[in-house]
Amino acid sequence: MIIMYAACAVALFLAMNIGASGAAASISIAYGSGALPNRRKALLVCGIAIFAGAALGGSEVVKTIGSDIIPQSILDAKIVLIILSSAALSLFIANLMGIPLSTSEITVGSVVGVGIAYKALFINNILVIVSFWFIIPVVAFILALGAGKGIKKLEKRYPKLTSSGMRKPLSIFVIIVGFMEAFSAGMNNVANTAGPLVGAGIVTVSTGVIVGGLFIAAGAIFMGGRVLQTNGKNITSFSLLEGGAISGTGATLVILASIFGLPVPLTQVTSSAIIGIGAAQRGSAIFKERVITKILKVWIVSPVLSLVLSYGLVKLFVHADIYTLFVLFGVCTATLGTLSLAKTIKEDSRNYFENSGGI
């Protein structure tokens, strides 16, 4: 009973942190563009949209996380606690290191780690989920690129679109699509906290999406100010139409994915849409930005980090296999050492050539 209560507590803690990070960022374009200039009102709109999305459309992704990745027979209170703790710990470690992880990816990674420990995975379902982690951001880029080029032509042909007289209707448009993006965040992200609990039979689907959605919304409203401020400052180079295109692209794709029960990374979808708009503005020069490399690293690091944590916790606390931990520690140490060595070699090589030691 204590373990069950602990699992529920960790789920609610994770929900609050999801709301404070990725979910709060979903309204940042409306806030940063000035369509919703008041931070408190922007977060309130975000919270309402998140809760509505979770309550009305979060059930399909919850079922996927709870029963379509590993057999439900594996899930009990202890395993659920391990899954949720791995996801929460991954987020915590990432926050310390300043790495923006996808909550959907770390939750799926945590569940997969448990499945690997038990040698029980629905491989076909996992391949479908992972493939869409790449397909949907690519589609977001293409759609945003097309929208960006279309907007450039429209603004050139009709200069009135950029005039102060059009600001109010365009602001309303941006607020609406921002609401829909936050709605999509609620639909997709509530599964990260409710899915394992539902799969283990600890809560029902309806209770999971309502309570989970409520806590994600609360996290966005009361703790999302810093993320909103940071993300809002990063979008000032976009016009209102371009900002609306970014939010609209992300919202549409994530809502569609949620309807089909696919947990997808909203942050990567939005980032890909931003890159698409940037490519429409600047052409291929956008691909020289370090953000591209950063996104690719996030795609890889997010699920792998939580997978390793959940696998290790199962081996330690369920199978009492302490030797596996030594192996994991050795692999992590070797990986970090190799990366550090490669960086040192690269720096030495650069210094060698800069000091005329080379050609």
Image (cartoon, grey):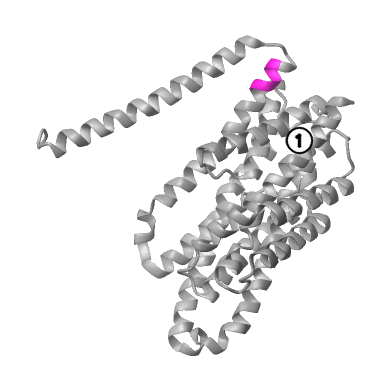
Which secondary structure dominates the residues rendered in magenta? helix
State the image coordinates of residue 14 (x, y, percent, origin top left): 72, 41
Would residue 279 appear left or right of 354 to someone viewing this image?
Answer: right
In the image, residue 32 sits, relative to residue 113, either above or below, namely: below
Q: Is residue 341 visible?
A: yes
State the image coordinates of residue 305 (x, y, percent, origin top left): 57, 32
Q: Is residue 260 visible?
A: no
Q: Residue at x 50, y 87 (%)?
A: 163
State the image coordinates of residue 325 (x, y, percent, origin top left): 60, 15
| Quadrant of the snapshot with the N terminus | top right
In the image, residue 338 sits, relative to residue 261, either above or below, namely: above
| Quadrant of the snapshot with the C terminus | top left
Amino acid type indicated by mark 1: Val
Q: Residue at x 71, y 54 (%)?
A: 222
Instruction: Give the residue pinned by disc 1.
Output: 10
- Magenta-drawn stretch contains 314: yes
- Magenta-drawn stretch contains 213: no
**Highlighted range, magenta:** 312-316
Circle 1: element type: helix
Q: Residue at x 57, y 34 (%)?
A: 93
Q: Callout 1: 10 Å neighbours few (<14), some, many (20+)?
A: many
